[in-house]
Image (cartoon, grey):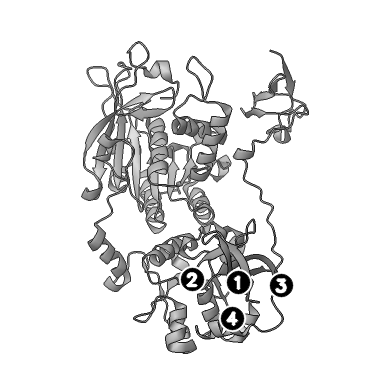
Amino acid sequence: MSHRKIQCPQCQSTRQKNPGDRPLYVDTATGAAKCFHCDWRGKVDASGQPVAYAPLQPKAKNYRKPDYIAAETENEKLLRWFAGRGIPPAVVKRHCIDSHTIFFPQSNREERAIAFPFFRNGEVVNVQYRTPQKLFRLESDAELILYGVDDIKPDEPLIFTEGQLDKLSCDTAGLTNSVSVPNGAGTNLNVLAGVEKLLAQIPRFIVAGDNDETGQKFQQELIRRLGAEKCWRVSYPLGCKDLNDVLQRFGTDGVREVIEYARPVPLEGVFQVEDVLPDLLDLYRNGRPKGEFVGWKNLAKLYKPRLGTWTVVTGSPNSGKSSLLRALSVNLAHHANWRFLVFPPEDCPPALYFSLLIEIYLGLPFDAGPIPRMSEDEMLAGADWIYDKFIVMNPADANRSLNELLQLTKKCILRHGVNAVVIDPYNRLEHFQPPGMTQEQYICGLLSKFDTFVKNNHLHGFFVAHPTKLKKEANGKYPVATMYDISGAAHWYNMPDFGLSVWRDKEEPQSPIEVHIQKVRNRWCGRLGFAELYFDGRNGRYEEFPTVNEFGARYTYEEQSSDP
């Protein structure tokens, strides 16, 4: 096997002191490369440039722009249809709405349909078609954007609706600063990223979704992404489920009145029964939220994390806190469809952290060794799954305060819809304790800020915090760490909703770890106790029962992994 040394494409631009250094070792047969300065690994071509794996890259899309021209002559049948819904010809013409004959996969035939063109900067970028039977389709390979995006006026309140007819109802009432999501309550709200800068300039959002179960859930997620502090929510008259119903029954004055009397989303900590009546009815009918399945039945009896709460994870030295949390995160991403944003400075660069997740997801070793590893195709397939579920925060050292990480999390909530955030560990944050403030006061303020952020943004948070130096017991073993053993203050016990401590007997490598649940705020989400799990270092997974080799012996921590 022959190698050559070349400049690293990942870190060369930062090598000001040694610009001629060649830290990248390349296998000339396969192109596999490793940098001994920044630890970048990958493949390079003959010129030394990285070979991009398509499944790992953000999918660059070349969107097709539809050839759409509205008819110049009036379509009387179309105008009558809209008139029956209270929308006048002037509004229909303003939006260049027409009717077309187009194929619908749902009916497997061509249908006559209303065509709603989506404009951006005066140019049609997509078209949605709707039949009288409420079949819907968009142009294939066209970009998905908000309907009415050209009507957004910075520095003015913006009305968010759930359908084109509701947007047109706003226009009919003279409220043109309004938009509709493209696919109703089923819209992937990542579409908001396309107008992120515009939305940042809007002082207030009026959310006018449909008054049904799916509409309520849609509004909750939209409000979460836009920020509850900037959102007002409408209430409809009895018998109306959306703005077009209001227009048909009460006219333009009714639409304006509904928007005018929109109420702010309740302030933090200030509620009346009517503010939360839908939630109260949901609790009564469906029960209190019992949290999510964590992937292991024995632990699930004790611990069911849910959104709007957070968990502190501690444990004795080298007990496996981080590896357990990685496996737990993969389980929750799989079973609960949570999307994680992770700050793992001890497992960076990000490619290293992603490799650990892929190993857990596939259940196969990432590295070559005596046990057959995953194939490259399997690795890339695993990376595709991870791409949709995990994002890593790895800012520069000077930008690692809790405030800055939470600001970054807020952006990822809007852009990616993340609903779980992991900080592992606490001591790797950048801390700025003001003069004259005690450590106890500082930790209380920091954890209060994290607690408020998690609850206001309906996330689940995980905070890994190491205990102070534990003293070994008479038998020479470390005791089970408690949250009171964490450096700083008793706030580590008082603040979180769940407390989890990991312990293992390092003198008995074949023994399981013990996951001790030391705090559960809500009894319907778990109880105190401990569960045993066996670590399989070949793939980073934890199992309820020991994994044995071909000789019937348990794999030990030391045999399986250097990262317990």
Label 3 or label 1, whichever comes before in sequence order: 3
Q: Which mark is residue 69?
A: 3
Secondary structure of the residue carrying numbered label 3: loop
**Type of residue at label 2?**
Gln
Inter-mark Cα distance, 4 to 2:
15 Å
Inter-mark Cα distance, 4 to 1:
12 Å
- Viewer-nearest of labels 2 and 1? 2
**Residue 59, position as x, y percentages in the image:** 63, 46
25 vs 210, left or right, is right
Label 4 or label 2, whichever comes before in sequence order: 4
- Viewer-nearest of labels 2 and 3? 2
- Viewer-nearest of labels 4 and 3? 4
Inspect this view and state whether residue 20 appears: yes
Secondary structure of the residue carrying numbered label 4: helix
Q: Which mark is residue 78?
A: 4
Can you identify the residue that label 2 sits on? 133
Inspect this view and state whether residue 484 appears: no
Label 2 or label 1, whichever comes before in sequence order: 1
Above or below, 391 relative to 272: above
Labels 4 and 1 touching (C-beta < 8 A): no
How would you rate the neighbour count of disc 3 (Cα within 10 Å): few for under 14, some for 14-19, many for 20 or more? few
